[in-house]
Amino acid sequence: MSPSTVRVGVLGVGLMGTDHAERLAARVAGATLAAVADPDHARAHELADRLGVRAHEDPLDLVADDAVDAVVVASPGFVHEEQVLACLAAGKPVLCEKPLTMDDASSLRLVEAEAALGRRLVTVGFMRRFDPEYAQVRSLLAAGDRGRLLVLHNVHRNRSVPNADFRSEMIVRDSLVHEVDSSRFLFDDEIVEVTVLAPAPTSHAAQGVLDPQVALFRMAGGGLVTNEVFVNSQVGYEVRFEAVAERGSLTAGLHSTALLGTSTAGGEGAWGGVVPADYRTRFARAYDLEVQAWVDGIRSGTGAVGASAWDGYAATAVSTAGMASLASGAPVAVTLAERPALYASAADPVAVP
């Protein structure tokens, strides 16, 4: 029987985990925050005390806790496989922040483990699928009135990187991965080849870091995707795209990013509005809708929504190929395992909010 109120535990209470914990504690209907866990025990206890919940020192103890119905995994990617497998073994729905795991082999193991259960318990946190503009464009393209999607142009810029250890390959694995998933989502198709190139780097990048980067995706159905990722733009968090179809184009993201001439010369990145400072501001609504839809699916018993474990595996496989292309400068083919029947579509659509 599905719970009337979903008791959620959060693994990892860094920026994203804390954001989710606060969301569950205050803004998600039908859910309550039950517990948190983090290797930084002091940080976990501080958040737990502030929000009035329990703090576990061992994340697997949180997963096993009978007072926890579902789990948000916001821990570092290298522990995701163990933690998601524990959730699957316990039969608990899990919302896992990207990346699903750090490499395609371990991501595939999670796909196989979930497929063996015969039901979806894993949602991967590609929140752009729940952004109202992304979801609306996906719906309009799926309706077919504009014909086939031919070319997608993505722009993804950050003001700066979170720390000095953010290297060139992390731009692919941790930033471009969002364009990987949103491209699969909008095309409803798999990426079969990736090329990642870099111009002369910005003077704001750390020594040896290739930033910005430009990536080209070839889709299985013949579509093309261009991607600019620039993680030290010095302006703000800009994410937008233009989808070019046979009969017209669709653009999203202009309402919250700079249109022309963004610069820090005046002290702030602006065009008459405000360029968001980071992803939590730009996609705040998407995160709220994603977690609410996840909780609603658990309560209703209809199952997982949004990006699946297969989507997480495919994104990891493309990112792995992208890192190889960045190193060589040559196109790299993406080879995926056979998709289990549990995952019907390359990019399961979500309802337009």
Image (tube, rainbow, N blue to C red):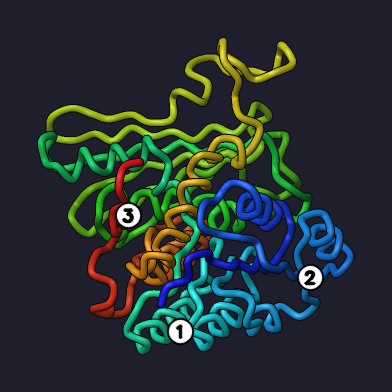
Q: Is residue 201 visible?
A: no
Furthest residue in direction front, as rendered: 4
**Secondary structure found at label 1:** helix
Q: Work out whether 189 lies above or below 27.
A: below
Q: In terms of sequence position, does the residue under pointer 2 or pointer 1 come before the other? A: 2
Which residue is the site of mark 1?
Answer: 109
Residue at 28% from the left image edge and 77% from the top image edge? 342
Which residue is the site of mark 3?
Answer: 184
Residue 54: x %, y % from top left:
77, 69
Q: In terms of sequence position, does the residue under pointer 1 or pointer 3 come before the other? A: 1
Residue 115: x %, y % from top left:
35, 83
Which of the image's four quarters has the N terminus? bottom left
Residue 325: x %, y % from top left:
47, 59
Measured Cα–Cα span from mark 2 to mark 1: 29 Å
Which of the image's four quarters has the C terminus? top left
Question: Which amino acid does the dot numbered 1 rest on?
Answer: Arg
Residue 55's disc is 2
Question: Which amino acid does the dot numbered 2 rest on?
Answer: Ala
Q: Nearer the viewer, mark 3 or mark 2?
A: 2
